[in-house]
Amino acid sequence: MASDTLTSSARTDAEITGLDALEIAGRDKEVSRGARIWAATWPKLAALAIAIAAWQIVVWTGWKPPYSLPPPLEVGRELVAQAQGPQLWDGLVTTLQRAALGYVFSVAVGLLLGLAVARSTVLRAAIGSMITALQTMPSIAWFPLAILLFELSEKAIFFVVVLGAAPSIANGVISGVDYVPPLLKRAGRNLGARGLNLYRYVIAPAALPAIVAGLKQGWAFSWRSLMAGELLVSGISQTSLGAQLTYSRELSDAPWLLSTMIVILVVGLVVDAAFGAADKAIRRRWGVLDQAGQ
């Protein structure tokens, strides 16, 4: 009997030792923060290098004349020159202010609308499919109506930005609430969560990944709608990025046009990185992110 106890104790010690070894091995695999940043950065740099190389090769083929498709180096010099003057930064501030205002309002409308539809069977039957239809409608199709209602004004752009973004955000909320497991809701009710508290402490955290995905998609729609609006309603602002695209096209200034397009692309990449960081934080909190492979 004593020997069996000793054998069992030895086996337990061996198992603990094995678990410790696995934990130590996991720690050994952890990499430094700099290495993680580099691992996330070099694929983007490689993709950028490939894109620039392909651009230069197309220029070398003579497919289009240089005044129509300038080489990357010329566009880079133009971008540096624009960055040293106030025009680019004034336009960027104007465009970002419009984007922030329209997106914040879209988030408020989308969250409230999505929550209302998710909670009400009547509202879901009445306007649930309409929200999806609005989401699939091209933003540019709203501009004739917006111009009729608000003329060539900031309100016309704001109107289209909200209609472009809010349906996507609302659909993200609806999808997130729909996919919350019923068992989780029952557990919340058993613990005393009712009404708004159930949504605040149980449903909202569980639906957060889908909501963040809807917010990200809503930003993409609002940014595209804003750029379309600034191209069409360029007369109300002489400095916005969309207005600079219009003026550079009218002046046949390809380097200016392409450098402005690069700025618009960079803004999109920065916002996408912000949403990516938020998504990673959520996955880390949920315990579905490999800590060693971050």
Image: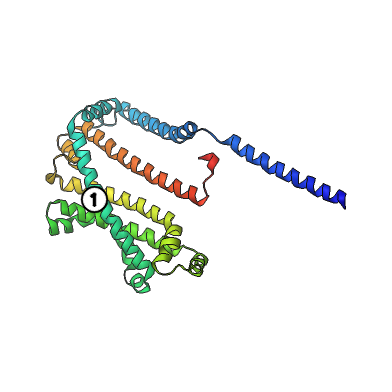
Q: Quadrant of residue 84?
A: top left
As displayed, is residue 251 above or below residue 173? Answer: above
Q: Which of 171 and 50 is in front in this view?
A: 171
When the figure is inspected, residue 31 is found, relative to residue 129, above or below; the finding is: above
For disc 1, the marked residue is 101
Q: In which quarter of the image is residue 172?
A: bottom left
Give residue 41's position: percent from left, percent from top: 43, 34
**Kind of element beneath mark 1:** helix
Residue at position x 51%, y 32% in the image: 32
**Residue 75 percent coordinates (x, y):** 26, 29
Tell me residue 210's x, y (percent): 42, 56
Q: How crowded is mark 1: few (under 14 residues within 10 Å), some or many (20 or more)?
A: few
Residue at image coords 39%, 63%:
174
Q: Position of residue 182 (x, y in %)?
A: 50, 67
Residue 138 seen in the figure: no
Q: In this view, does 101 lie to the left or right of 287?
A: left
Q: Which residue lies furthest to the bottom in this view?
A: 122
Q: Which colour scheme is used?
A: rainbow
What residue is rendered at 59% in x and 37% in y?
A: 27
> In the image shown, does 120 or 246 lie closer to the viewer?
120
The reply, left or right, for residue 177 in relation to residue 30 is left
Look at the image and tell me whether residue 108 can be seen. yes
Nearest to the observer: residue 206 or residue 134: 206
Quarter of the image for residue 242 reads top left
The amino acid type found where label 1 is placed reads: Leu
